[in-house]
Amino acid sequence: MTPSHAARILIVDDNRTNRLILEKHLGKAGYRIVSVGGGAEALERLEPTLDGRAEDEAIDLIVLDVMMPDIDGSAVLRRVRESKSPSDLPIVMATAKDRTQDIVDALEAGANDYVVKPVNLPVLLARVETQLSLKLARQSLKNAQQSLIQAAKMESVGYLAAGVAHEIRNPLARIKMGIESLRRHPVLAGEEKPAKTLEAMKSACEVADQVVRGLMKAATEIRPRIQPVAVADVVREALGLIEQAVRDQGIILELALDEPIPKGRSGVAELRQVLVHVLTNAVQAMPDGGILRVRTGTRIIEDLPEQDAGRSGNLPRVGDTMIAIDIEDSGPGIKPDRLLAVFDPFYTTKATGTACGLGLTIAQRTLDILGGLLSLENREEGGLRASVLVPRAGMFQTTV
């Protein structure tokens, strides 16, 4: 997909004739066009883009008139730059002013480029295309950088696990044995306060042990046995492992697993563990009860992260049909700017000491190896939707 066919351009000009000319010319080039007649209307239309709420409707580039009666282009430019950098949201100024200082002022205020009125349409088209190509290149570079950072984090997790896991687990085991011995000691039998203290110590040891086991799992090379898998059966097995927590927290479970779907291409144990990680996160988001919905079906991949799009081999591509497992909770959701951070090692939105922040990291890494995908999105009605996408059996020709 080229920038010309992917980008949504906002045209801001108080002259209707100018807007119609630009709409026609840029629309003919394949852009999706939104046009408004003034600065106030432009800021209103841009609000979801500036605060991160817009996704499919986000503006990719602005062609902005300078001289307007309500709020001029310079004021709109300054407002946009409070939230979006020139690399995030390019702005091409259209100005009747051709004095050098006016142009310099616009560029220093954060404009990416400019055209002088009356607008030379081929020149405008070339500059728009250039800015969108630069934006795409910067995004690709940013994605590559994030991939390197993530790889470095996982490598550091591996070194840490290899160096300290056994040394920590051994004393933890001795501490837990000592706690059990003290709990049975006749001197402490029936004493409420010591019993509560020992229970708290035992709980703390279990949390520490979970962190260490998480480190060991994150550092372990995953070697799944790939085979055709009845996905709905694996979902039921995973639900069985969290059944007690669901019941204890008064969570209502709604299932839709009966739709006939093809078998998946996966490892049974690995897929089950991925689902347990995701389901556990959903349950922990509803400590006071709520609704947990789990459904299976098929889905055509319409979009991929930039670093994954178009790859060959055992990785999905746009247009592939995959098996989808959607897990929805009615919890508080996640702040939009934190949706990707939750996959980072040790990142957690939970209270300190209640989680080690490796569950989704491990789940995503496992799905990468299985040729699947994991995505999160906030639901309009509240809560979070996690989508686990699994390849269909026979989807890939090569083997893992």
Image: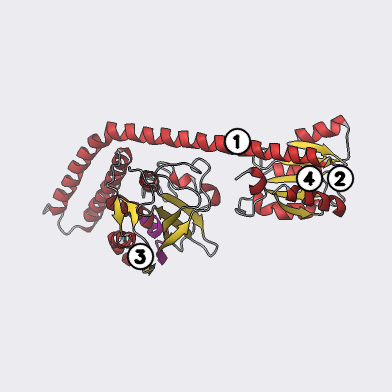
Q: Is residue 385 visible?
A: no
Q: Earlier in the sequence, mark 2 or mark 1?
A: 2
Nearer to us: label 4 or label 2? 4
Residue 63: quadrant of the picture: top right
Residue at which label 3 appears? 249
Q: Amino acid at mark 2?
A: Met
Spatial distance from mark 4 to mark 1, Cα to Cα? 22 Å
**What residue is disc 2 on?**
67
Tell me, yes or no, whether the highlighted magenta stretch contains residue 288. yes
Which residue matches tag 1? Answer: 138
**Which element carries disc 3, helix, strand or loop?**
loop
Q: Is residue 162 magenta?
A: no
**Residues at discs 3 and 2 in contact (Cβ within 8 Å):** no
In this orientation, which residue lies closer to the viewer: 164 or 352? Answer: 164
Counting residues from the start of the chain, the first of labels 3 and 2 encountered is: 2
Q: CA distance from mark 3 to mark 1?
A: 45 Å
- Let me know if residue 146 appears in the view: yes
Q: Which residue is mark 4?
A: 64
> Is the Cβ of the residue at disc 4 closer than 8 Å to that at disc 2?
no
Magenta region: which residues? 280-295
Indicate whether 122 appears above or below 200: above
Mark 4 closeness class: few <14, some 14–19, many ≥20 residues within 10 Å: many
Q: Amino acid at mark 1?
A: Arg
Vertical position of residue 157 compared to residue 285: above or below: above
Which type of secondary structure does the marked residue at label 2 adopt? loop
Amino acid type, residue under disc 3 in the picture:
Gln
Nearest to viewer (mark 4 / mark 3): 4
